[in-house]
């Protein structure tokens, strides 16, 4: 079974590059099967990690960034694959 964890945050105005660098520098307690980092307009940063684990498994996640770096708390979601 696998699960994808998504973490998305919006940087404080003008701090998108700093938030992106911060997210890329974060090490997790265990290595996911795959990890990708994205950026989008409005200084948004998205990190997706894939794990070979059950949907409800306890998995390491990115922490909340320093409060002055973001305009709101990060959003987090879990997804599981479905057969096509």
Image (cartoon, grey):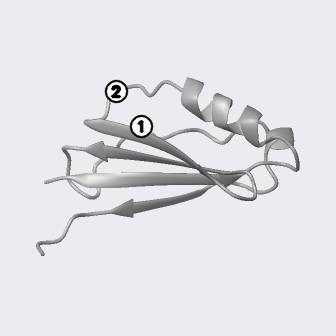
Q: What element carries label 1?
A: loop
- Is 46 placed above or below 19 here? below
Neighbor class of circle 1 (other Cα within 10 Å; few <14, some 14-19, many 20+) is some
**Image location (x, y in percent) of residue 5:** 40, 52
Residue denoted by label 1: 60
**Image location (x, y in percent) of residue 31:** 32, 27
Residue denoted by label 2: 30
Q: Residue furthest front?
A: 41
Q: Disc number at residue 48?
A: none
Q: Do the residues labelled 1 and 2 touch (CB within 8 Å)?
A: yes
**Image location (x, y in percent) of residue 52:** 19, 44
The N terminus - image quarter: bottom left
Give the total number of marks visible in the rendering.
2
Q: Which residue is drawn at 20% across and 47% down?
A: 53
- Is 79 placed above or below 12 here? below
Q: Which residue is drawn at 66% across and 30% down?
A: 22
Give the spatial CA distance, label 1 vs label 2.
7 Å
Q: Which residue is drawn at 46% across and 54% down?
A: 6
Q: Which residue is drawn at 30% across and 38% down?
A: 34
Q: Is 3 on the left-hand or right-hand side of 41? A: left
The C terminus - image quarter: bottom left
Q: Which residue lies furthest to the bottom in this view?
A: 84
**Image location (x, y in percent) of residue 42:** 75, 58
Q: Is 77 on the left-hand or right-hand side of 22? A: left
Neighbor class of circle 2 (other Cα within 10 Å; few <14, some 14-19, many 20+) is few
> Mark 1 or mark 2: which comes first in sequence?
2
Q: Is 32 on the left-hand or right-hand side of 68? A: left
Q: What element carries label 2?
A: loop
For this rendering, which residue is in front, 45 or 68? 45
């Amino acid at each position: 079974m696998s699960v994808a964890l998504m973490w998305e945050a919006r940087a404080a105005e003008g701090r998108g590059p700093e938030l992106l660098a911060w997210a890329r520098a974060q090490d997790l307690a265990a290595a996911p099967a795959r990890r990708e980092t994205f950026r989008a307009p409005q200084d948004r940063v998205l990190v997706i990690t894939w794990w070979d684990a059950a949907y409800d498994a306890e998995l390491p996640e990115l922490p909340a960034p320093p409060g002055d770096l973001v305009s709101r708390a990060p959003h987090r979601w879990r997804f599981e694959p479905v057969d096509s």
